[in-house]
Image (spheres, grey):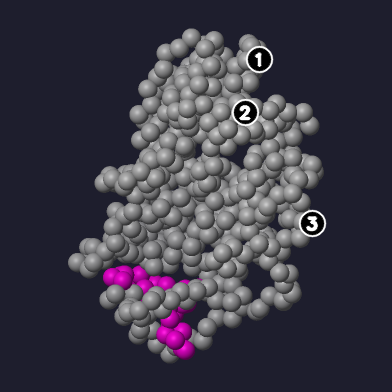
Amino acid sequence: MHGIIHVNQERGDTMPYIEFTQEQKEQANNTDLVSFLQMRGETLKPCGREYKLIYCDESGKHDSITINGSKWFDHKNQTGGGAVKFMQEFYGMTFPEAVQELLGCTIMPEYSRKYERSPPERSEPKKAFHLPERNQNMHRVYAYLIKSRFISPEIVDYFAHQHTLYEDAQYHNAVFVGLDENGIPRQAHKRSTATFGKSFRMTCTGSDTRYSFAHFGESNRLYVFEAPIDMLSFLTLYPQNWQEHSYIAMNGVYENAILKALETHRNLQEIVLCTDNDEGGIEAAYRLADILHEHDYHKISRILPEMKDFNEMLKALNGAEALPAVPHQRLQIYRETANSLHEIYYEPQNLSDMLREFHSRNEYTLIAESALAGSVFFLQKAGFSADFETLKRKLGREYRPHTDKGSKPSKWRNLDRKVMQSISLLYRGEYAEKSDVQTAKTLYETADCAVRMCAEEAMSAPAQEEEPEESQSQAYG
């Protein structure tokens, strides 16, 4: 492959910049990661339709990364994407190195791996699923849910009568049961009823994670929660005609149960995400919205609890100590930075020199402002109605915090790559409409990378007093 070599004057090193075709980039990003990693000796375990990657780091052994075809998601760090991003995040590669490796130009033997390879494991047959033995009564579960968690007795009664909530005989845990489309138990989640000490929760061995604690009504609306107690708390807070709608608890932030529910209940077309009002819950809502869009569900909204979650709201209403909401700092900073950008007036022929100069000084705000102004120019040139204020609002609206998990050097490399792509397009001097649109798009992406670097810089600055993150309800378009 032929490439252009450019020198980063700020860093004083030489980094290869390779012009891949769009077809090459797509081919690399669509690589089947399961086959690719198995050929390279990685340990993967089947998990339903997905695979879990087994790896080790300084904190021990992990199986938090799930892989399906070319897509992956790290549930531990709440990040994921395609094959190229996997190589960047897991092996610490640059974009050109990742694409080269995925296209078959092997550089791995010379490349240091981010994690240690896990020793091979013997495959074990999947253990059968059994519900925990039922206790003769539900005294402890009722006391815990009603007195400690302030959940309505009528709500607890309803699910107890549906046999999807009961007390286990051995430890007196609350057991939340997930039924399949035929009403057969396929999953169970246990939660301790102790009101002191460390809280205990676990999904029972052999559970099918495609099914979870839920209620299905006749309307087209599905409410999605992280945990069963969040769901029961919401029903307590908003009881009017609740049985008409559908509700499901994910037992975390995994999408399997949601997608299965949508597959088996075709009436469900409107999804309301009710994850926690903290960093993990906010990122989960954006990630789930993206996944649902990919499955052609577009009527998606978000209800943010006023406190950390809906049970904390119940606690506050009943005079108990409650945890407040936790704003997403990086999301706030990104939006504030994007909103504060000012339009730069310039001669179009000087834009490439401006970008090069600002980039050499790591002037991230100026890179964003000049790139965004250039994007407006080329969009207007291609016949589109565009202005600076509209594009900077678009930046804030389209930002997805769960995609912004890389290291600072990785983000710098992304910005470096986008700046060089922009300069290359500007130097070509092509004025066809298609070229104008591509240039506008690349400049817009450059602005996004620059604002991400601004947020990264601000995150290391001394903490300041924070404002509430966002309003109670919002649409995910």
Query: Foreground residue, 334 or 169?
Result: 334
Residue under pointer 2: 7
> Which segment is the magenta one?
149-177
* Left or right relative to 107: residue 291: left
- The residues bearing labels 3 and 2 have C-alpha atoms spaced at a distance of 35 Å
Could you give the CA–CA distance between mark 3 and mark 1, rounded to whole angstroms? 41 Å
Residue at (74, 32) in percent of width and height: 23
Q: Earlier in the sequence, mark 1 or mark 2?
A: 2
Label 1 CA crowd tier, 10 Å (few <14, some 14–19, many 20+): few
Residue 475 vertical position relative to residue 432 in the rendered view, above or below: below
Q: Measured along the vertical axis of the image, is residue 313 above or below residue 340?
A: below
461 left or right of 42 in image: left
- Mark toward the viewer: 3 or 2: 2
Name the N-terminal-most of marks 3 and 2. Answer: 2
Work out which residue is located at the far front of the displayed protein and give it: 12
User: Residue 78: image x %, image y %?
Assistant: 52, 54
Judging by the rendered image, the residue that carries numbered circle 3 is 39
Image spot of residue 69 (x, y percent)? 70, 51
Question: What type is the residue that disc 1 sits on?
Answer: Arg
Residue 169 is a magenta residue: yes
Residue under circle 1?
Answer: 428
Question: What number is the disc on residue 31?
Answer: none
- Counting from the top left corner in percent of width and height, residue 352 is at 55, 17
Residue type at mark 2 is Val
* Residue at 42%, 50% in the rendered image: 282
Where is residue 334 shown, x and y percent of the image?
41, 38
Q: Quadrant of residue 129?
A: bottom right
Camera sees residue 221:
no
Measured in 3D between alpha carbons, the distance from the residue under mark 1 to the one under mark 2, in whole angstroms, is 20 Å
SS category of the residue bearing label 1: helix
